[in-house]
Amino acid sequence: LTPYLKFQVIEVADEKAPDSLSEAEVVQVKGREGERILAQIKSEAHVIALAIDGKLWSSEELAAEIDRLGTYGTSHVVFVIGGSHGLSDEVMRRAQQRMSFGRMTLPHQLMRLVLVEQVYRAVKINRGEPYHK
């Protein structure tokens, strides 16, 4: 991606927690992770949170949205992938959009790979360059 745009992956540490948590403990874990995520997001950034209940976009729709954001002055786009418990309410409120890759839950490391590939595909679509289908 770097020949086409400035791209950076920022990871924040998962909150250490036992496998079995109460609902209140899950909220606390997500809150602490959310604070670390929000600390990495600049105020001018357009945030797209990955969420199961988000909008399903095709590759072409993602390309069009990235192009639209750039055209109208939002060149700093941040995609946020949650940890094993998802994203905090605070992170979800900060997001201007929610995007879904489907109803399945995927490990965040795998989701990052899929997301990066789709951003690369979107860049190629917007540049009118061929990309393997």
Image (cartoon, rainbow, N blue to C red):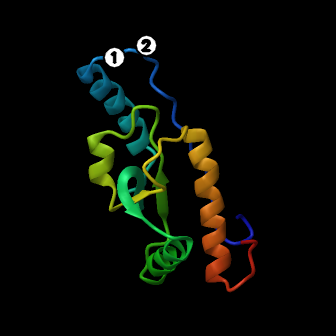
Residue farthest bottom in this picture:
128
Element on which disc 1 rests: loop
Q: Is residue 61 above or below residue 104?
A: below
Q: Can the viewer see residue 6?
A: no
Q: Can the viewer see residue 112?
A: yes
Q: Residue at x 34, y 56 (%)?
A: 95
Mark 2 closeness class: few <14, some 14–19, many ≥20 residues within 10 Å: few
> Which numbered circle lies on residue 36?
none
Q: Residue at x 36, y 57 (%)?
A: 54
Q: Residue at x 31, y 32 (%)?
A: 31
**Residue 91 image point, x, y percent:** 33, 46
Q: Can you identify the residue that label 2 sits on?
A: 18
Distance from the alpha carbon under mark 2 to that under mark 1: 7 Å
Q: Is residue 97 above or below residue 25?
A: below
Contact, mark 2 vs mark 1 (Cβ under 8 Å): yes
Work out whether residue 71 or residue 124 is closer to the camera in this orientation and state it. 124
Q: Residue at x 44, y 76 (%)?
A: 69
Q: Can you identify the residue that label 1 sits on?
A: 21
Image quarter where the N terminus lies is: bottom right
Element on which disc 2 rests: loop
